[in-house]
Amino acid sequence: MSLVHDHENTVPRPALILAGALVATTLALTALVQVGVLNREAVPAVERASAGVVAVETRRLAFEDRADGAVVVKDTDSGETLAVLMGENDGGGFVRGVMRGMARERKMKGMGQTTPFELALWTNGSLSLLDPATDRSVELGSFGPDNRAAFAKFLKTQPKGKTA
């Protein structure tokens, strides 16, 4: 039995140098964005405003949890129940997940659930959900066509075209 212990570095030196350079570049770019030298990523609401994109339809919605786990979606202007979502097959899982995040933000800010959410279809085909209470907006096309459709079905006008 040998008591020789080997401390040889098994990671090649060029790989370590490249990894360090990647970390340094990432930190430098982040700092440049923070101080305003580089523009941050596009903000959809700002991009829509600068391009003159307007809402084709806006619907004010309330989402209520039932004791059986279903989510009831209502149009707050008419009082009409638009859907009762029970699970994944009807888009309820995605809707529940998005609304859970929105509700958590309201709770953290000490706000109630009385203010309706605004679902908007834009002239460029994008679909967004805005919480006027917190100013948080979710671009629903970012989650793929099936998840976008889970919210699009609450509109009177069924969207066509762009899915972003």
Image (cartoon, rainbow, N blue to C red):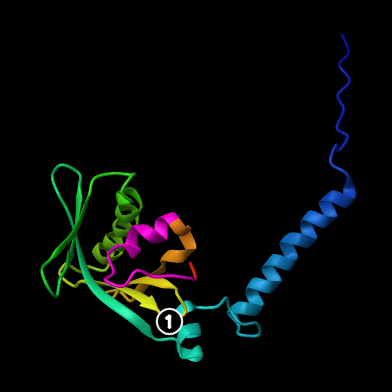
Does residue 8 appear to the left or right of 163 in the view shown? Answer: right
At 15% from the left edge and 69% from the top edge, which residue is drawn?
Answer: 114
Q: Is residue 68 visible?
A: yes
Circle 1: element type: loop
> Which quarter of the rendering shows the N terminus?
top right
Image coordinates for residue 145, horizontal then vertical, percent: 46, 58
At 34% from the left edge and 57% from the top edge, which residue is drawn?
Answer: 150
**Could you say which is closer to the camera, residue 90 or residue 110?**
90
Type of amino acid at the residue the image marks with label 1: Thr
At 35% from the left edge and 72% from the top edge, which residue is drawn?
Answer: 136
**Could you say which is closer to the camera, residue 147 or residue 63?**
147
Dot 1 alpha-carbon crowd within 10 angstroms: few under 14, some 14 to 19, many 20 or more: some
**Could you say which is closer to the camera, residue 59 or residue 6?**
59
Residue lying farthest left? 79
Q: Is residue 147 magenta?
A: yes
Q: What range of the chain is rendered magenta?
A: 146-161
Image coordinates for residue 105, horizontal then vertical, percent: 30, 64
